[in-house]
């Protein structure tokens, strides 16, 4: 619902911004609008002054936007398509909106996207502004090993290491042959680790115990070891060894008795 509200507001803002009136006539949603490969977007009438802004971060269409004087921050964001779903992002992280001016390291405007939607009072955009939409409290986690969908996942602050394993499809548990046993181990390596995992546990303890909290840069690995157990050949081999030992013992006993 939150994403729908964000997109609905920004879409309405875009319609309002793209409909100049008066002696210039009405600019349709497509008329005068141009998009070229590489993330360059142009939306202004011929002869209008153009404001160039750069849109970064969690938007559907990041790039360079040349817009006419009727566009504001909400209009540019509407065209860029604010979304937390540009990457596999889970866990309801907070989206932050920041507006940077050329030559300044601190943003001139900073607010959660939800706050901007509720009260879209922000400075006017200027030529050269950078609009950044970022997710707060996001951890990037690599899930490798015996899982269904190994890869890198971005998760929000509400997600645990068990959730990250679930996103990767869980452990790969192929059917076992008769007599074969499987041992599944979960390991977590922290950023800057020196080779030894910061967490190691069986799959059962990982699922039933307290799941370790996630940190940015974690590597979660699932290892699976198969123990084939004793096959028929193993039993026959062992039986042969035992039989040979018994025969050798009997012969030794006879030798000792005969020697007396």
Image: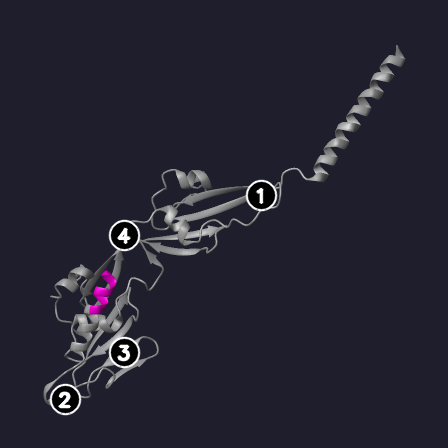
Left or right side of 180 for 198 = left
Q: Give the vertical position of 67 relative to 242 (above or below).
A: below
Check residue 224 for magenta coloring.
no
Chain part drawn in magenta: 1-8
Q: Residue at x 29, y 70 (%)?
A: 62
Whole-angstrom CA distance, mark 3 to mark 1, is 56 Å
Q: Give the vertical position of 221 relative to 123 (above or below).
A: above
Residue 202 in percent (x, y) is at: 47, 39
Residue 78 in percent (x, y) is at: 22, 72
Q: Nearer the viewer, mark 4 or mark 2?
A: 2
Q: Residue at x 85, y 14 (%)?
A: 256
Q: Earlier in the sequence, mark 4 or mark 2?
A: 2
Which residue is the site of mark 3? Answer: 41
Whole-angstrom CA distance, mark 4 to mark 2, is 46 Å
Q: Which mark is residue 24?
A: none
Which residue is the site of mark 1? Answer: 226
Element type at mark 2: loop
Q: Which of marks 3 and 1 is in front?
A: 1
Which residue is the site of mark 4? Answer: 137
Q: Nearer the viewer, residue 143 or 180?
A: 180
């Amino acid at each position: 619902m939150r994403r729908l509200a964000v997109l609905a507001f920004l879409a309405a803002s875009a319609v309002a911004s793209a409909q100049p009136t008066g002696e210039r006539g009405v600019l349709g949603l497509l008329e005068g609008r141009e998009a070229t490969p590489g993330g360059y977007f142009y939306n202004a009438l011929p002869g209008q002054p153009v404001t160039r802004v750069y849109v970064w971060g969690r938007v559907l269409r990041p790039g360079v936007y040349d817009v006419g004087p009727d566009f504001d921050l909400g209009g540019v964001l509407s065209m860029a398509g604010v979304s937390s779903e540009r990457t596999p992002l889970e866990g309801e992280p907070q989206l932050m909106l920041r507006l940077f001016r050329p030559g300044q390291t601190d943003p001139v405007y900073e607010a959660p996207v939800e706050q901007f939607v509720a009260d879209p009072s922000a400075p006017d955009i200027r030529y050269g502004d950078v609009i950044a939409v970022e997710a707060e409290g996001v951890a990037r986690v690599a899930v490798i090993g015996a899982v269904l969908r190994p890869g890198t996942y971005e998760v929000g602050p509400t997600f645990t290491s068990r959730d990250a394993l679930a996103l990767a499809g869980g452990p790969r548990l192929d059917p076992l042959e008769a007599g074969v046993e499987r041992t599944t181990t979960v390991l977590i390596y922290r950023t800057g680790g020196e080779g030894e995992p910061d967490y190691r546990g069986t799959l059962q303890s990982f699922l039933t115990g307290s799941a370790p909290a996630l940190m940015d840069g974690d590597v979660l690995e699932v290892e699976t070891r198969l123990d084939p157990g004793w096959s028929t050949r193993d039993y026959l081999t062992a039986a042969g060894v035992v039989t040979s030992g018994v025969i050798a013992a009997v012969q030794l006993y006879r030798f000792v008795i005969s020697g007396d």
